[in-house]
Image: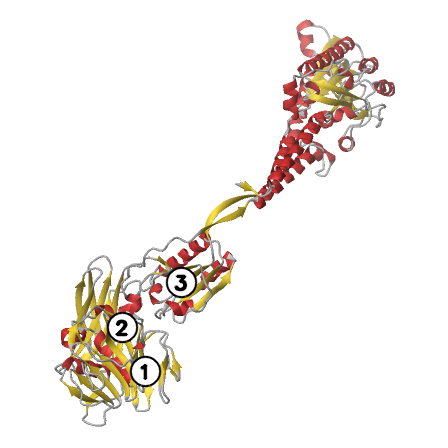
Amino acid sequence: MSFASPWAWLWLLSLIPLILLHFLRRREREYPVSALFLWEGIRPDRPHFLERLRRRFDLLLLLQVLAVLLFSLALSQPFTQTQKLSGATLLVLDGSASALREGVAEAIVAHAREIIAQSAGPWAILLWADPPEILCDRTSSAAEALQALSRFRPRLSRRPELARALALLPEPWPRIVVITDNPAGITGIEVVQVPRPENLALTAFSVRPSPDGTHYEAFLRVLNDANAFKDVQVRVRTGVGEYLTSRLIPPGEEEIVILPISGVRESAFVAELGPLDSFPWDNVRYFAFSGGEVRVLWAGEEDRYLWAALRAAAPAVRVSSSPDLVVAFSAELPEEPRGAAFLVGAGTPGFPRGRLREADPIHGKAHPVLNHVSLSQFRVGKVWESAIPEDAHVILWAGDFPLLALWDGPYGRWAFLTADLRSSNLPLLPDFPILIGNILGWLLPEDPPSLLVVGEGLRLPQGFSVVVEGKEVEGLWVPEKPGIYELRRPQGTDFIAVNVPWEASSPVSSPAGALPAPPLAQVSLPLWPWVVLALLPLLLGEALLFARQGG
Amino acid sequence: MAGIGGGLGSGSAALELLTAEELFLLSRARVSLRRPRGTLLGSHLSRRTGTSLEFADHRPYQPGDDLRLVDWALYARHRRLMTKVFSREVEAPLYILLDASRSMAIGEKFSFAVKLSAALCFLAFRSGDRFGVYPFRENIQFFGKPRRGRAALVRAFSALSQLYPEGRTDFASLALWAERFREPGMCLVLSDFLAPGFREGLRALRYSRHAVAAVQILAPSDLDPQIFGEARLLDVEEGRARSLVVGRAAKETYREALRRWNRELLEACLELGVAHFLFSSAGSPMEAALILAKRWRP
């Protein structure tokens, strides 16, 4: 404890006259007696000095001394010093779908409260969700910041780029703390990781025709994000039938489940995973075929897997002229294709495909074409050293070499996939038809995509509408819940499948490297209000005692 | 309550002074005189002969005696005509002389005395005797002659409940009272007797042929004052004060002075044939009344 005004202790000197006056004051007490003559002739006693002192040192004097002590203490302005983290703190709370797991949101808020209590302020709080939101603008009031935490509500959408959230409060922040359950992709920023409960999830679901064209196949990827083996049941509903299977999934692993589906082609599918857990949103996933027909001119070698993935993405038909899309597989085209083109290990005179080379690990960056796709599952053995236009947008890399590039060139929209499909696992992944569907959606943007995630906005073309809870929505539509939605178009009716983002179910990545501890600041906690609070009842008691003793 | 109190009204002053339990305690006690000198018929057996049912003696038959009073059994044994003589029952008025000076206010002495007076009045009422309460200070209040009955009891209680201690004690006023009330009776003086002149007052009462009891009531603070240190002792009657440092020795000296004073009172009582009773105001007035009824045999 320190004192801001230590000279105020001089007030203690007032105790000297107080005590002197107390002992010098004549302290006779009046006693009424029945007969004074009985007291006549009695010689006064001389009680022992210490006895008189004891008699005179009464409770009132003690209270007066205490009052002067507290008064001096209050005037000296005592305070204690505590160490708190200095500088302004920006709290970024992960409000993506994964925070909806049981206990995660509460843990995030608890950590935020703790950080506010331990830092000196000012503070600001951001909700890191899609769209990001300022929960509390820069404030020096801890109470205001704590109150803003009550508005923290995670959403079912994925979280956008962290930079997009931080752009809402662009001023420089000495300290940024991200509180999340998954610190994947966060570098250079202080991260507080909250634990996640165990989870079973369907992280991918797609349906495609079998390569031999005899039936359909449902592709599912099941994640066991728990510490024990889990016996899971997978069920796919097609509208006319149900297909069941079960698997024993090792802890912390993902397994691909392929379910053959016989019968007629359906438009929408629902996959369910049992048993349900504390985050049921990712125990169900939806898939829908695109409705618009795509006329494909196939060039180069045949590939049944690519063709099956194309047919899963859209009702593709082969044509020899006037195509909507040119698909070239493992070939050198004699001339530049006109219009939309999908070059898979293929080259053109202007952009030859080069030679095969060993592929390095795959990495990419966020892009709508990669929506619903988990890159961690991709394995590519070799890539073609294709020439890529300089102004092409590379969204996937195999080491330093482009793996998937998008080019909006003078001939139309082209997509370059340089992977050698026969040396990769892509055709066997449930993500592959989704990736092909996303590429088709970029190449032929006229048709709305058939797969969306919650929070992903879709601008519907003229004449298109989506039925949401019995009402038709036109123009911009942002789905808020997973499910199968009816898409009404001039040619007929199709379906759009909306899922929670797979990132919500992805396994936890290891946290970023430890950052140097932020600087500490000494914060003074004044104690004088407590002293004054103690002084008040003391003075009251003293007044009562004084009145009781008859002044 | 009605049976015990002889029909006292519930709103009467008796209820304020004595509770139902206290009235019940007193209902079987009575104060009686060994030698009542009253003339009116009452409940006290007199030595004079009369017409009560209490047999007193025989005397030789004289012509004119009522033949019903001849003891025929005695005649059969001794062949002598003897007439039976019976005692006479007379009443004895109860006079309560109550010290109402300011010194009685110390230590609940006055309220003790008032309750004791009320209890004694009730005893007299139950015995069918006349009674009267006469407060005295520098002078005495003459509330008239003693009376019997329910109305007198209510009146006495009402007067008692309106009394308050004030003024100085002057035992000379007892002599004035004795000159006025010459009919012999039971005379109780309720006081702390902490004032000079009590001997003259008691003597005047005795000379008027009253049976007198000095009922001394002292407070615990009179007996053992809780005074220590520098004290200003204020005489409540005279207004005089004295500053004194009171310690153990001073208190012992005071207690000795009080013992000496009481010894003088006791000697005066023995000399004058006055009964002396000492009660502490911390005790029960009802208990004091029962002790008086049982142990005072004038």
So how many labels did they put on this image? 3
Circle 1: residue type: Glu
Q: Nearer the viewer, mark 1 or mark 3?
A: 3
Question: Is residue A527 in view?
Answer: yes
- Identify the mark at residue A486; answer none if there is no mark: 1
Tell me if B117 is positioned left or right of A164 in this view: right
Residue A482 picture location, percent across and down: 32, 74
Q: Nearer the viewer, mark 3 or mark 2?
A: 3
Q: Which residue is mark 3?
A: A93
Chain under numbered label 1? A
Circle 2: residue type: Arg
**Mark pair 1, 3: CA separation:** 34 Å
- Identify the mark at residue A50; answer none if there is no mark: none
Q: Of A424 and B198, which appears nearest the observer?
A: A424
Q: Is residue A376 above or below residue A322?
A: above
Asked which quadrant contains residue A344, the reply is bottom left
Q: Which residue is mark 2?
A: A285
Task: Give the secondary structure at mark 1.
Answer: strand
| Callouts 1 and 2 in the same chain | yes
Q: Is residue A39 above or below residue B142?
A: above
Tell me if A327 is positioned left or right of A454 in this view: left
**Mark pair 1, 2: CA separation:** 16 Å
Question: Is residue B297 in view?
Answer: no
Asked which quadrant contains residue B243, the reply is top right
**Mark pair 3, 2: CA separation:** 26 Å
Circle 3: residue type: Leu
Q: Is residue A396 above or below residue A105?
A: below
